[in-house]
Amino acid sequence: MKRLLVGATTISVLALTASAAQASTTVGSTAPSSFSSTTSAPTSYIQRAGSGYAVPAGHWVLLSASARLASGGATPAASAVVARPTGTTGEFLIVRSLPFDVEAFQPSTVEQSVPASGVKVQGGDLLGLALGADMTAYFDSSAGGVVASTFGFVAAGSTYTFTDDPEHFVMSVSAVLEPDADQDGSGDETQDACPANPADQVAPCAPLVTPPTCELPKKARKALVGKTLAQAKKKIKRADCQVGKVKKPKNVPEGKVLRVAKVTLKGDTAGIRLKAVPKPR
C-alpha cells in the first residue's frame, strides 16, 4: 500500500539518548516495511519516538547509518542527519549531514549505508534521513511511533521547526553506535586504544593528569580574612591549592587579608585569590 506523508520528502530521525553501555549497538531498523512514500519535493522527517529507536544513556559516536531507499529521478539526493532539540518545542538543530550515494532511477527496497567518522552524539539527539524530490522511503505502520516533518532538505548547522504527523509509524532507518566514554569522538571498541584519556587514542596511553581539586571550603576561606598574608598562603598550600594573584589595595592595614575567592587559574588548575597588602620590609 502506498501512502503520502505530511510534506513531500522524507527525513528519518532516531532518538539518540547517549549510552553508557560497553558494547556497540544498533538503533532503529531497516527490516521490510509495510508501506512506502514517494516525495514530490524535498521534505525532512524525524523519528521522535518508536519502539527500539531509543538508545541507552551514555556517550556514543555514530559509526554508520542505513536506510531503505529508492530513486525515481536522474539526480537523487538523500542524507542521514543528526538533529538536536534546541529546547523550544518542535525546534531542532541539524548537527551533521551524511550523504548517501544513491544511483539515478535506483530500484525500490535497496538498503543504503553511509559510514561516519568522529560524529559524536549525545542524549536527546535524533538520527535523520533527508530525501530530495522523487525519492522513495519505507515505513512500518505496525510499530507505533511519532514522526515529525518539515519542508525542505535540511542542512547541517541550521535550525528547523518540525511538526508531528498525525499517523503513527516508524521509518526504515537505523544507525550503529559505539561507546565513547571520554567523549573524544573516537569509538572505544574499534577506534580508541585509550578510552579513559580524551587527549590520547593510540597505545601506549599517556597517564591521565587530574588537576588539583583545591579542597578549601567556604568557611575555611572566610577564616583567612584578617590573617597575615603569610598565614593565609600557608593554609592555602596545605589544602593543595595554588595561590592566585594577590591584589594590593591602597589605604588598608598592611599585611592583612581582606578578601578570599576560589578561582580557576591558568591550565584549569584550582586556586585561591587573595586581596591583601603585604607587610612592609
Image: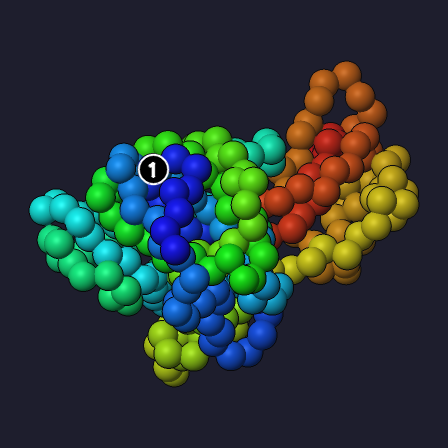
Q: Quadrant of the C terminus?
A: top right
Q: Quadrant of residue 249?
A: top right
Q: Is residue 192 visible?
A: yes
Q: Quadrant of residue 134?
A: top left
Number of callouts:
1
Q: Amino acid under label 1?
A: Ala
Q: Image check: 273 left or right of 16?
A: right
Residue annotated with mark 1: 8
Q: Image check: 274 left or right of 52?
A: right
Q: Image check: 121 left or right of 123?
A: left
Q: Residue at x 17, y 49 (%)?
A: 72
Q: Position of residue 32 (x, y in %)?
A: 39, 69
Q: Looking at this view, name the residue that lies furthest to the bottom.
A: 204
Q: Looking at this view, name the residue that lies furthest to the top.
A: 251
Q: Secondary structure at mark 1?
A: loop
Q: Quadrant of the N terminus?
A: bottom left
Q: Looking at this view, name the residue that lies furthest to the front.
A: 1
Q: Quadrant of residue 143?
A: bottom right
* Vertical relation: 81 (above or below) 23: above
Considering depth in this image, is 24 or 36 the residue closer to the camera? 36
Q: Residue at x 58, y 74 (%)?
A: 21
Considering depth in this image, is 69 or 100 the residue closer to the camera? 69
